[in-house]
Amino acid sequence: MAVITLISDLGHKDFYVASVKAAIYAQAPDAAIVDISHQVTPFDIYEAAFLLRSVWKQFPIGSVHVIGINPELTSEQSHLVIQYMGHYFIGADNGVFGQLFDEIVEDVFEIELPQGNDWVFPMKGVFATSAAHLSKGGNPEILGRRAKGYTSTMKQLPTIEQDQIIGKVIHIDHYGNVYTSITQTVFEQERKGRSYSIVLNRSRWNIKKISRYYHDVVEGERLAMWASNGHLMIALHGGVSGHGNGAADLFGLEKGNAIRVEFYGNSNS
């Protein structure tokens, strides 16, 4: 029995997540269901894709990932199953898949199951049925016909200019840690042995070293580090959002704000 992961904007206040799990268990009683997050900003496919991208490869081959963001079936938006690197992804063709994968995926199937009484709650109906089927080793062709592809969307990539990388804040976690669109791969490609300064919104807050651990700086001090998903993260050692000392709170950073890395000195290339 494969692992089934769930990511959505359903929250935890209501019965919605429990309904989805009940629908899966009714069809696959031995399923192992893992919640990635149900606190995604409502309808935000970019945030959902970022969170899922950060973790899906860590799950076993054969895992099924259900994406419950803006999931309604419309004349312009179909329901899809995508098979990629031994995993299955279920969701609406609303642009989230274009954010999720780094390459074009060809194994795409349009789900053609009847909507039934859950047409207003497809995560509980069509998605749960599809996930249960795939988790038991079912073939995706049983769920629908092969499709030509999925909707492509512009990825949140940093801009490369002379002697600098310009990224954006793309996620703020519940500690107030700030994730940027700048990845370690891009940083190393552009650095070329030069010194650097990570520029926040005021020069006195610039950071000139990327730490490996939080405790590389004293408690309460700002730091930059590579998060486990490879993205540049701005944090405070011991900072907690909501108590006035999370990095996002202290530096006044919000999603979409610019974060720059400026290089100086001689290049080794």
Image (spheres, rainbow, N blue to C red):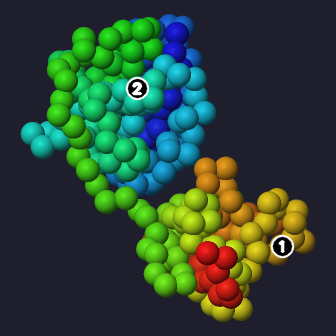
Decide: few, some or many residues near mark 1? Use Cα within 10 Å; few <14, some 14-19, many ≥20. some
Residue 15 in sight from this viewpoint: no
Say which of marks 2 and 1 sits in front: 2
Left or right of residue 97: residue 8: right
User: Residue 210: percent from the left, percent from the top?
Assistant: 74, 69
* As drawn, 200 above or below 86: below
Q: Residue at x 37, y 44 (%)?
A: 103
Relative vertical location of residue 15 with respect to residue 258 in this rendering, above or below: above
- Secondary structure of the residue carrying tag 1 is loop
User: Which residue, as the protein is rendered here, is positioned at the far bottom?
Assistant: 203
Residue 18 in the image: state x and y as whole percent: 48, 26
- Whether residue 30 is situated above or below residue 69 in the rendered picture: above
Q: Nearer the viewer, residue 17 or 96?
A: 96
Q: Alpha-carbon neighbours of circle 2 within 10 Å: few (<14), some, or many (≥20)?
A: many
Locate the C terminus by quadrant: bottom right
Instruction: Kindly tell me whether residue 65 is visible in this rendering.
Output: yes
State the image coordinates of residue 97 (x, y, percent, origin top left).
34, 43
Identify residue for label 2. 88
Image position of 226 (left or right of 165): right
